[in-house]
């Protein structure tokens, strides 16, 4: 009942994640990313504690594969977890617990891993990954959005999606983009509207934080 992906922009060093599901407030639980470090997805019967733990492993120098192995070993409930990781070099890894229900799949392509569970069909992650690759010239947040839209077009999940999230980190301790739809019909379309409105302001908000004297707008 969740589909998601991690992505990296090798040109800018950005990491990001996007996710959608038929339950409330998915952005508060599933996607985790840290500038200069990488990203973690923790879903199915979600344990949000595994996100910060996975990031700490990546920060300590673990590869994506080693971080996933350590996360699985850290929890006695791993049968209920579906996990993915991306490290600072763009390497990816995933884990499907034995209790995760189909349709499910995970697809790894350059600088991206897409996965899902209780999907309408097992082609959804592949459609997401291909859309991510095809949008290579676009900013990372846009690539992630197009991937989510491709997943929805490929069937998404069996129930109506009501929450979705888009997260991108770059250099600062705060996210470059952190947009969430917590409870709305057609949540991916709602997230698209949020991103289209936010995109022209991304650099403005960063400048306001790090160099307010140079920020445009009212004084």
Image (cartoon, helix red, strand yellow):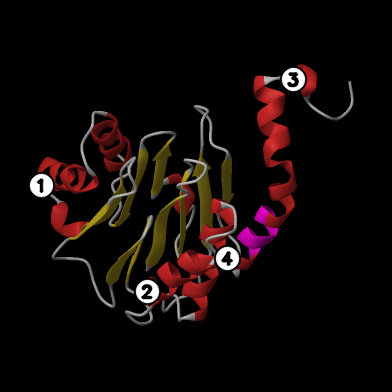
Label 1's element?
Answer: loop
Estimate how packed mark 4 is, as few (under 14), some (14 to 19) or many (20 or more) residues with alpha carbons within 10 Å: many
Estimate how packed mark 1 is, as few (under 14), some (14 to 19) or many (20 or more) residues with alpha carbons within 10 Å: few
Relative height, residue 216 to residue 22 (above, below): above
Q: Are marks 2 and 4 in contact (CB under 8 Å)?
A: no
**x and y percent of residue 70 in the render?**
14, 41
**Residue, disc 2:** 126
The one of 28 and 198 positioned closer to us in this rendering: 198
Label 2's element?
Answer: helix
**Residue, disc 1:** 76
Residue furthest to the right = 218
Q: Are marks 2 and 3 in contact (CB under 8 Å)?
A: no
Q: Quadrant of the N terminus?
A: bottom left
Q: Earlier in the sequence, mark 4 or mark 1?
A: 1
Q: Earlier in the sequence, mark 2 or mark 4?
A: 2
Q: Which mark is residue 188?
A: 4
One can see residue 123 in this view: yes
The residue shown at (38%, 55%) is: 111
What whole-number distance in Å separates the C-alpha atoms at marks 4 and 3? Answer: 33 Å
What whole-number distance in Å separates the C-alpha atoms at marks 2 and 3? Answer: 42 Å
Relative height, residue 213 to residue 217 (above, below): above
**Residue, disc 3:** 212
Q: Are marks 1 and 3 in contact (CB under 8 Å)?
A: no
The one of 81 and 183 positioned closer to us in this rendering: 81
Q: Earlier in the sequence, mark 4 or mark 3?
A: 4
């Amino acid at each position: 009942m969740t589909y998601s992906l991690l992505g990296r922009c090798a040109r800018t060093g950005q990491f990001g994640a996007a996710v959608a599901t038929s339950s409330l407030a998915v952005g508060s639980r599933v996607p985790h990313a840290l500038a200069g470090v990488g990203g973690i997805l923790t879903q199915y019967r979600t344990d949000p504690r595994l996100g910060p733990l996975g990031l700490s492993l990546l920060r300590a120098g673990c590869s994506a594969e080693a971080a996933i192995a350590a996360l699985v070993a850290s929890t006695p409930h791993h049968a209920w977890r579906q996990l993915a990781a991306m490290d600072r070099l763009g390497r990816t890894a995933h884990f499907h617990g034995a209790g995760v229900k189909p349709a499910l799949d995970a697809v790894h392509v350059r600088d991206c891993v897409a996965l899902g569970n209780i999907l309408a069909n097992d082609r959804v992650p592949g459609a997401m990954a291909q859309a991510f690759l095809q949008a290579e010239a676009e900013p990372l947040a846009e690539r992630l959005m197009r991937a989510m839209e491709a997943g929805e077009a490929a069937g998404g999940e069996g129930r109506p999606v009501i929450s979705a999230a888009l997260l991108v980190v770059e250099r600062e301790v705060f996210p470059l983009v952190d947009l969430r739809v917590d409870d709305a019909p057609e949540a991916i379309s709602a997230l698209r509207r949020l991103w289209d409105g936010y995109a022209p302001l991304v650099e403005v908000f960063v400048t306001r934080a790090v160099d307010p004297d140079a920020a445009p707008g009212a004084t």
